Amino acid sequence: MQKSTIDTIFHLAILLALVGTLIGILMFTGILGCNAIPGACEIYYQVFRGGAPSVLIAYGEGGLGNHEQLEQLMGNRDYLGVRAQSMPLERLSYGNVNEYDLIIVEEAKKICSSKLQVFQSYVNSGGRLVWTGDSGTELCDGDELLLDRERNEGGSDAPLGPWARKQFGKQLSFDEFLGVNYKANYCGLSNCVAGVEAGRIEVTDSQHKLVYGLSPSIKYEGDFAIIEINKGTNSRLVATLDYGTNFVGTSPGYPWLAGGEKYDFGKTLPFIVSNQVGERVAYYAAPPEMLVNQKEPYKAILEQMYYGLLYN
């Protein structure tokens, strides 16, 4: 074989290796979905992750959700047939979270600022995160709320919300990381009644990976988190809850909502929001098992959460 031919093959091999590495990096960061190339998802997880995607359900104490039920639903072959592992928040560390391709946080109202930083680092390292309901809305001893004036020039002395914090004098803007800010739980603002429809989940973008192919309107009963989308972030509104009329609730007295005052949150309430590069972070106002366990079971929303974040 002539030297010129060998050189051409050698250069072509290097080029293919560089292209393959670039595609792997783009898939890792979520900029390019692995489904862009037929069969690439399976190859990606086998080569880069050593097998099928691994899922962790991180839970604490209190708050919306039932981690045991979610684990059972995900393992049920009639739903996903995916093995998920549950782990208490206190056992999470910078090292062990990187073993998982997807982490779902629920039933975890109290989360310390140090753990929020672990989740930020995890996503920055290529992980996918589903944050649900009122997770992390209760602070630990020593954690501080960030005031409006400490972030915004000319702002007030009111705290921005439970996900905007200070730690050792430095800002921890987990609200901007999620792209949303928590106000209160629906049942904490009003006298919600069990078995009564709270509203309808309306899909805002039928082509979005988290809701692709879902019914454009889904009845919803039960509690959920009232949130607002943060301005200036790259948040993408995926689904809303249509309350039917303006939802006016009486504040239970959180530092960011004056006690006893009435707040008008509007008719359309954000329900599913994605954020971060490649939309690797998804916020759900209610944990996925609460969406599935309605009078009319709607398992597709659980399937799209899983496949949307890991295979698109």
Image (tube, grey):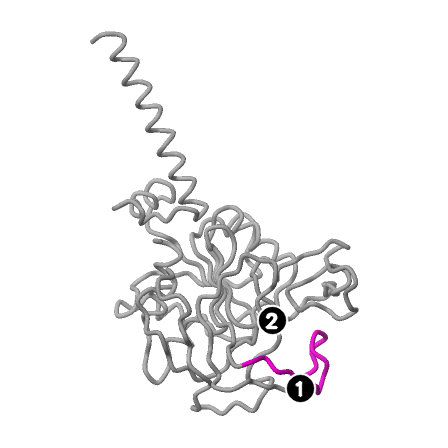
Which residue is labeled 1 in the image? 262
Using the rendered view, name the quadrant where residue 10 is placed.
Answer: top left
Which residue lies most toward the left here? 1
Q: Residue at x 52, y 72 (%)?
A: 133
Name the amino acid type tagged 2.
Tyr
User: Which dot marks residue 79?
Assistant: none
Is 159 or 299 nearer to us in this picture? Answer: 159
- Number of numbered labels in the structure image: 2
Using the rendered view, name the quadrant where residue 111 is placed.
Answer: bottom right
Name the amino acid type tagged 1.
Lys
Q: Residue at x 31, y 49 (%)?
A: 35
In the rendering, at what x and y percent does residue 155 appear?
77, 65
The quarter of the image holding the N terminus is top left
Check residue 254 for magenta coloring. Answer: yes
Would you call the spot at circle 2 few (<14 residues within 10 Å), some (14-19), or many (20 or more)?
many
Is 134 or 15 nearer to us in this picture? Answer: 15
